[in-house]
Amino acid sequence: MSAILTSFLLLGTSLFSFWLTRMIWVIGALILVGVGLATYLGNISIVGLSALLVLGLFIYLEHKQINRAITRLFSCLIGIFAFAFFTHLIPGFHNYLWLSQVKLSALSAPLNVYLNFDKTIAACIVGLGLYYAKPKIFSGLFQKNVFKRVITTSLFISALCIALLMGLGLALHYVVVDIKFSALFWLWFVHNLVFVCIAEELVFRGYIQTKLTGYFIAKQHSWMWGLIIASVIFGLLHFRGGPLYIGLAAVAGMFYGYAYHKTKRIEASILVHLLLNTVHFIFFSYPYAAG
């Protein structure tokens, strides 16, 4: 168990280190050590490792920009592979069940939390590709005007997002009001920040929405199409939760995507995502209403 946590924490550190260092080799080394340890421990098989290498190869070939059509083909393949990793459709990974059937309250359904190696490593690889192509995407956050704009915009969009999503959740009986502060909160918070919010926003806003928006703008269509399609794909990511969960996630994705578009900063969508999830965890039944 401790060795599994160590490998997973190395991968989590890799995700966080995009903002901590300008040395890409440090991030790459952290990813390699984390993947190597997970492979040694049996959490990744040769099949899973091969799939990760294919994803890395697609990113490398996309950056080569052989011609526009081939570059777009590899962009599509990267998006498809990333989606497959995030939905655990690619074999060869043994994700660890960290929290099993935990009830945060009498009103909340049982909660399972996995340490998802497939999703986390895919996000690391896509993030590494983003970092290589545009290293400035992760820098400059703490410049005065940038930081203020990210915070104020994110808080405003978060307020709208929380009001609408929680209102819909209550109206559709997906959640109920359930104010609580669990002893697991800080563990959940760190896991949710790094392995849910950062991982998902890097891929779905930082990569997929950026590519789609660029494509539609190049075709002289509205950037909104990129936002909408990326949000629908994000909703489908949650297909195991059923149609209602897909719909709610897609609506949430619209807010995350708009925060990213408005600020041109991935941190804005991460913050909106995190604030919605945190309010959900503390003030409403989580992950959904028991019953």
Image: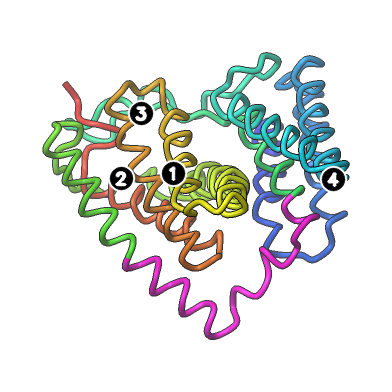
Give the mark nearest the N terminus, 2 or 1. 1
Tell me whether circle 3 and circle 4 mark residues in contact (CB < 8 Å). Answer: no
Rendered image coloring scheme: rainbow
Residue 129 at x, y percent in the picture: 76, 48
Say which of 248 and 108 sits in front.
Answer: 248
Determine which residue is flagged by label 1.
188
The residue segment tinted magenta is 130-156
Which secondary structure lies at badge 3? strand
Determine which residue is flagged by label 3.
111
Structural crowding at the residue carrying mark 4, measured as other residues with C-alpha within 10 Å and reported as few (<14), some (14–19) or many (≥20): few
Q: Identity of the amino acid at label 1?
A: Trp
Q: CA distance from mark 2 to mark 3?
A: 11 Å
Asked if the magenta segment contains residue 155, the reply would be yes
Say which of 59 and 42 sits in front.
Answer: 59
Tell me whether circle 2 and circle 1 mark residues in contact (CB < 8 Å). Answer: yes
Q: CA distance from mark 4 to mark 1?
A: 40 Å
Determine which residue is flagged by label 4.
65
Q: Identity of the amino acid at label 2?
A: Phe
Instruction: Tell which residue pokes out farthest to the front in this image.
Output: 220
